[in-house]
Amino acid sequence: MTSNKRTRSFRILVVDDNAAIHEDFRKILVKAKHRSGDLQSMEAFLFGAANRSTISADDFEMDCAFQGKDALELVRRAVAEGRPYSLALIDGRMPPGWDGVETIGRLWEEDPDVQIVLCTAYADYSWDEIQRALGKSDSLLILKKPFDNVEILQLAHALTCKWQQQRESQLRLNKLAFYDDLTGLPNRTLFLDRLALFLELAQRFKKNGALLFIDLDNFKRINDTLGHSVGDELLKISAERLGKCLRTSDTVAGVSSNEFVARLGGDEFTVVLPEMERAEDAAAVARRISEILGQPIDIGDNQVIITPSIGIAIFPQDGDTMETLIKNADTAMYFAKRIGPNLFKYYQESMTATALKRLTIENHLRRAIRSDEFTLHYQPQFELSTGRVSGLEALLRWESPELGDVPPLEFIPVAEECGLIITIGEWVLRTACRQAATWVKKGIPLQRIAVNFSVNELTHPNFLKMIRRVLSETTLEPQLLEIEITESVFIGNEGIMAILNALKDMRLRIAIDDFGTGYSNLFRLKEMPIDCLKIDRSFLNTCGVDGGMKDGAIICAIIDMAQAMGLRVIAEGVETTEQADFLKEKHCQEVQGYLFSRPMSTQQVESYFRRLALSKNHNGQCTTR
Ligand code: C2E
Ligand code: CA
Ligand code: CA
C-alpha cells in the first residue's frame, strides 16, 4: 500500500491483488514528474511525447490496495480526514479476500459518493447480477480487461468531473442547511450536531469541556436606534472577532485549539471548548471574548461598543445531555446579564430554581396591569400619643390567576430589572391619589397618603412630569401625598438633590424608608429636603427584649436625631405591646405595624373609618388595641 499526501488533485484508489496492475494504472494516471526517473523514461518510450501531452491533461493522486479490506480502511481514513476518494478502480477477483462486488458494497457503506469502475477480465458477473447485489447506481461502470490506456484516462476524467460537480452542489446545500447566512458561522443545526459529538467524546475519554452562551448586551436598543443594517454589520463584525479570538486561543492555558463557534440566531452565539484541563480555563476564554468583542467599532460617525454577557456550563458536570447543558449555560448567561453588563458567570445549581421563578414572574407581570391583577392595600400609621390615624401607606398587591398571591418583595425587584416598574409605579400613584381624593371628598379624615418609589423610578427622566400629571388628573392636594424612598437613593446619586427639591417645590412630603439600614451619610441627610424618617423594622425585632439593647440604642439615637433636625419619625413593624411601650417611653411620634392594623383593602379602610367615627371615643382614636 502506498499513500500520496498531495491534496490539490483528485484522489483515486486502485484495488487489485496484482502489483503489476497497480503500476499500470500509475503510469496512466499519475503525471510523470511525480514518478521516479526510470518510470518516466519507460513512459516516454511507451507513449511517446505527443501521446502523453493529450492524455496527461489531468493529474491524479493514487493510492493502492491489494485487498478489499485494506481498501475499506483507506476509504475510512480518507473520509475522516475530509479528503475522500473521487474514484476507485476495483478488480473483480482478489483471492483470498472479498471479490469486487462485495468490496464495492462495503466501500459505498463508508463513502456513498465514490465513483467506481469494476475491472473484470472476463464476464465474472452479469450486469443483472451486479444490479441485484448493489442496487441501481449511476456511480458504477464496468470495464472489461484488457483495457486501453486512453479509455482509462477518459473514464477517470469523466467520473472525477462528475464526482466534483456532485460534491460542489452537496457543499452548497450543506452551506444553506448548516451555516448562518449573515455571518457565515455554523448555525444552530450544526451546533447541535457538533455538541452531541463533543459530549459523546468527552464521556468516552473522560474529558471536561465547556459550553459558553454569549448574548450581546443591549443589542436590541442598538438595532432600534441605529437601524437593522447597522445591526447586521455589527453582528458580522462580532462574529468575525469571535472567530479570531478563538483561533488564536491556543495561547490560553489548557484549551485545545479546536473550539467551535456558532450563531444560534439574533445576537446569541455559542462557543464549545471540547477539551479543557481545568474548569477555570473557560473563564480565561470568556475574558478574552469580552475583551476582544468590547473594542470600539466605528460605524459612520458613531462609535459603538458591544459587550457580551456570557454563561458557562462545564460538561459533563453541569449536564451530560445536550438539553440540560444548553439550558444551564443559558441560565448562567441570564444571571450574568441580570447583574452585568459585560460579565460572565459559571452555572450553579441554585440558579435554576431562582431563574425559573424570576422568568415566570416576569412573563406574568407583563400582563398583570392590562388584566387588572394589581390592587392597593393601605396600612394606617398612628400618632402614638393620641392614637389618632395620621396617614395611610399604599402597598401594592398582586393576585395572579396562575401564580396566586405574589409578595411585593418577590415581584418588585423583577419589575425593576425588566423596566416594568415605571408603568407599575405610575399605576400605583394614580390609584392611590384617586382613592385618597375620593376618601377626602367622602369626608374621611385622611391627613396623608404615602406611596413607595424605588430608586429606578425616582431617577427616571419622566418622574417629575408623571407626578405632576397624576396630581392634576386626580385633583389630590399635593401636601397630602408623601413619597417614601429608601436610603439607598442617596448612594452615588448626584442628581437626586434636584429631584427632591422639585418634589418639595410641588409641596409634596418626603419620607426616608427603612432608615438605619442604608448607611446614609448623616451629614448629607442634614441638607436633604425631607420630612420624615421611618425606622426600619429590623431594629424593633429585639429591642426591649434580652440582648436587644443595641437595637434599642439605635432607635433612641434615630428618634433624637430626627427631633433635632425637626423631622417626624415613624417606627415600622410594631408587633407587640412591649415594643409599643418602649417607643412611647422614648417619645417616638408615630407607629405602624400589625399590632395596630394590618394593610387593608379599600372596603376595609372605609369600614374601619366608619367604625372609628361611630365609636364612643373621639374622632380618629385607635380602637384596634
Ligand atoms: P416597606 O415600604 O417597608 O413596607 C412595609 C412592609 O412591611 C409591608 O410589606 C408591610 O405589609 C409590612 N409590615 C407592616 N407592618 C408589619 C409588621 O408589624 N410586621 C411585619 N413583619 N411586617 C409588617 P409588603 O406590603 O410585603 O411590602 C414589602 C415591600 O415592598 C415594601 O416595604 C416596599 O419596599 C415594597 N413595595 C410595596 N408596595 C410598593 C409600591 O407600590 N412601589 C414600590 N416601589 N415598592 C413597593
Ligand atoms: Ca414603605
Ligand atoms: Ca419600610
Image: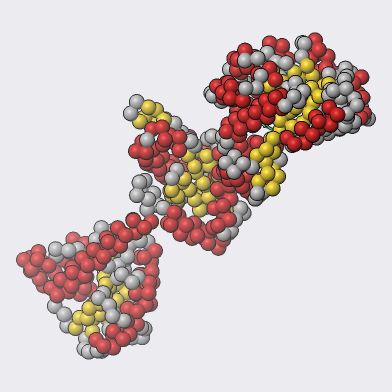
Q: How many marks?
A: 0
Residue sitting at x 19%, y 63%: 59
Does the rendering let one see residue 244?
no
Q: Quadrant of ligand 1?
A: top right
In the image, residue 165 sits, relative to residue 94, either above or below, namely above
Q: Residue at x 14, y 75 (%)?
A: 151
On screen, residue 200 above or below 500: below
> Is residue 251 visible in this depiction of the protein?
yes
Give 383 or 313, whichever is nearer the viewer: 383
Q: Nearer the viewer, residue 468 or 255?
A: 468
Q: Residue at x 64, y 42 (%)?
A: 373
User: Percent x, y for residue 387?
Assistant: 87, 23
**Closer to the camera in the image, 341 or 392:** 392
The x, y position of residue 602, in whole percent, is: 73, 35
- Side (left or right) of 239 relative to 350: left
User: Is 113 rendered above or below residue 528?
Assistant: below
Residue 418 lies, in percent from the top left, at 57, 37
How far across and how far down the image is residue 599, in percent? 77, 34
- Which quadrant: the C terminus? top right
In the displayed structure image, the side of residue 384 where residue 407 appears, left or right:
left
User: As drawn, is 447 to the left or to the right of 162?
Assistant: right
Q: Quadrant of the N terminus?
A: bottom left
Furthest residue to the left? 50
In this image, 81 relative to 617: left or right? left
Location of residue 296 by image quarter? top left
Q: Nearer the viewer, residue 239 or 613?
A: 613
| Residue at (45, 34) in percent of width and height | 221
Describe the colour scheme in one phrase: secondary structure
